[in-house]
Image: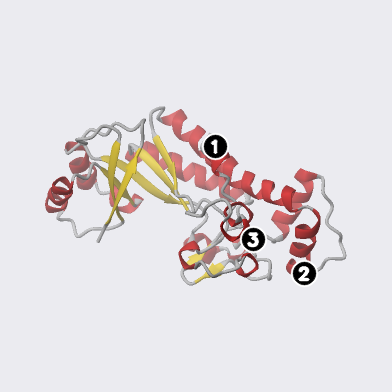
């Protein structure tokens, strides 16, 4: 199974597009190895770009046939969604304002301020670029915890999850902003309410910078290995005023900063 995407970019010039600047993409994570039929179907549909998993793109035959057919390749890289890392070390979980691990159905999130984890992600991406040489990388789950597909229009801001309130994030926030959270606040919800009342702007800016800075670091390292590599970010499709600005206050995605 695969899903089809249509993306217009003034800087994108795919090798197999009939309309310059038009990206017709397909998203696929696995396949039954009949790549010839798959590619023929894509060509019939006008598809010129594939967004795929590292596992599928590791198949040499798949890489070869996409290149032979001038299909631009993006490897999808889940950043803070990492079930394996969390199973190995549950201490990595982001913590919600209610003191719970960041879980919703199958979506589980790593705390975004863990420097060792962030470095491991960058190292992993560099290895993928060196070994598989994709045309682009597609950064998925590079945000704070929220299962946005299950957030319906009738939800309120306060009903949304909010992270991360583990000791690593709280300590880093205080250290980097010079804001002191009272020691008397013992629960995550108490800390959340105090931040909301006293320094929400600084908190949101700090949350967004955790995401923006990692995107910048990944981009820098990727382009040092392959200057022409394409990079895109999976954005939560919320407008700036949806759920009282949750795109920044909850997801931590500042589009104006990310696009720079």
Q: Where is residue 48 shown, x and y percent of the image? A: 23, 41
Give the side of residue 153 with respect to residue 12, left or right.
right
Category of crowding for the residue at label 3, using alpha-carbon neighbours closer than 10 angstroms: few (below 14), some (14–19), many (at least 20): many
**Residue 118 visible in the displayed image:** yes
Query: Which label's residue is closer to the chain start, 2 or 3?
Result: 3
Residue in view at x 63 percent, y 51 percent: 114
Residue in view at x 56 percent, y 69 percent: 155
Q: Name the residue under label 3.
A: 163
Q: Where is residue 207 shown, x and y percent of the image? A: 65, 50
Q: How far apart are marks 2 and 1 (CA)?
A: 33 Å
In the rendered picture of this protein, how many numbered marks are placed on residues?
Answer: 3
Category of crowding for the residue at label 2, using alpha-carbon neighbours closer than 10 angstroms: few (below 14), some (14–19), many (at least 20): few
Q: Where is residue 183 shown, x and y percent of the image? A: 86, 61
Q: Residue 187 carries which label?
A: 2
Q: Name the residue under label 1.
A: 216
Which quadrant of the rendered structure holds the N terminus? bottom left
The kind of secondary structure element at disc 3 is: loop
Task: Give the answer, above or below, for where 187 lies relative to 65.
Answer: below
**Residue 172 visible in the displayed image:** no
The kind of secondary structure element at disc 2 is: loop
Between 206 and 172, which is closer to the camera in this rendering? 206
Residue in view at x 19 percent, y 44 percent: 46
Query: Which label's residue is closer to the chain start, 3 or 1?
Result: 3
Q: Are marks 2 and 1 in contact (CB under 8 Å)?
A: no
Give the side of residue 134 with respect to residue 143, left or right.
left
């Amino acid at each position: 199974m695969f899903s089809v995407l249509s993306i217009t970019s003034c800087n994108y010039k795919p090798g197999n597009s009939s309309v310059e600047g038009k990206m017709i993409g397909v998203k696929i994570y696995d396949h039954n190895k009949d790549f010839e039929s798959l590619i023929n179907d894509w060509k019939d549909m006008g598809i010129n770009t594939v967004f795929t998993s590292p596992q599928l793109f590791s198949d040499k035959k798949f890489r070869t046939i996409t290149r032979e057919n001038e299909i631009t390749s993006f490897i999808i890289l889940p950043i803070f969604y990492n079930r394996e890392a969390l199973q190995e070390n549950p201490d990595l979980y982001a913590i919600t304002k209610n003191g719970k691990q960041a879980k919703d159905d199958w979506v589980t999130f790593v705390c975004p301020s863990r420097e060792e984890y962030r470095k491991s992600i960058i190292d992993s991406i560099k290895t993928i670029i060196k070994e598989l040489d994709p045309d682009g990388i597609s950064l998925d789950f590079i945000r704070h915890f929220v299962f946005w597909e299950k957030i319906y229009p009738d939800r309120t801001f306060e009903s949304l999850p909010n992270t991360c309130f583990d000791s690593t994030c709280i300590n880093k926030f205080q250290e980097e902003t010079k804001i002191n959270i009272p020691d008397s606040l013992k629960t995550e919800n108490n800390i959340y309410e105090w931040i909301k009342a006293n320094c929400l702007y600084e908190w949101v800016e700090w949350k967004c910078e955790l995401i923006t800075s990692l995107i910048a670091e990944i981009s820098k390292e990727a382009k040092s290995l392959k200057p022409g590599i394409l990079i895109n970010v999976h954005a939560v499709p919320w407008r700036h005023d949806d759920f009282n600005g949750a795109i920044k206050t909850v997801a931590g995605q500042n589009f104006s900063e990310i696009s720079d």
